[in-house]
Amino acid sequence: MTDDLADAVVSVPDVSDVPDETGASDASGVSGEAAPGPEPLGLVRTPTGHAGVDAHLARLADADHLTADGHVTVYEDVHRGLRDALTALDAPPVPGPYENRS
């Protein structure tokens, strides 16, 4: 039975560009109307006082203007930046130019 399933091929036609009954070709599924675009949530971001962290948090506003598919890229970028900022807190201090005298 598994061989029968492995050999079965299902072909689904792409219907995104097929005109509807009114003749309009619209992937939104609504005849004659454009799909609503992304809308900002209007969240207020309180500054942390750390310039690097605040810059990464401000980057979250970029997701307000993207569709849901684009959010992942922004969130991963912000997460990477915040993780690097936290990792930097654990790093030993770098000696200044005059602290290595012998």
Image (cartoon, helix red, strand yellow):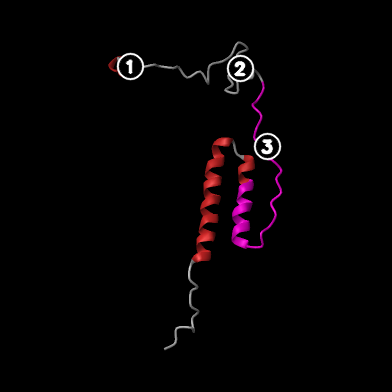
Q: Nearer the viewer, mark 2 or mark 1?
A: 1
Instruction: Tell me, for residue 72, which label it has, or none.
Output: none
The magenta segment is 33-61
Earlier along the polypeptide chain: callout 2 or callout 3?
2
Which amino acid, by three-letter code, is at mark 1?
Leu
Q: Is residue 91 above or below residue 31?
A: below
Q: Residues within 10 Å of mark 2 (few under 14, many from 20)?
A: some
Identify the residue under disc 3.
39
- Percent coordinates x, y for residue 73 in the rendering: 52, 44
- Separation of marks 2 and 1 at Cα, in angstroms: 38 Å
State yes or no: residue 28 in magenta: no
Which amino acid, by three-letter code, is at mark 3?
Glu
Which amino acid, by three-letter code, is at mark 2?
Ala
Q: Quadrant of residue 48?
A: bottom right
Please give left or right for residue 18 compared with residue 33 in the image: left
Cβ atoms at labels 1 and 3 below 8 Å apart: no
Instruction: Tell me, for residue 24, which label it has, or none.
Output: 2
Report the residue at 58% width, 36% height from top.
68
Instruction: Tell me, for residue 5, which label it has, or none.
Output: 1
Cβ atoms at labels 2 and 1 below 8 Å apart: no
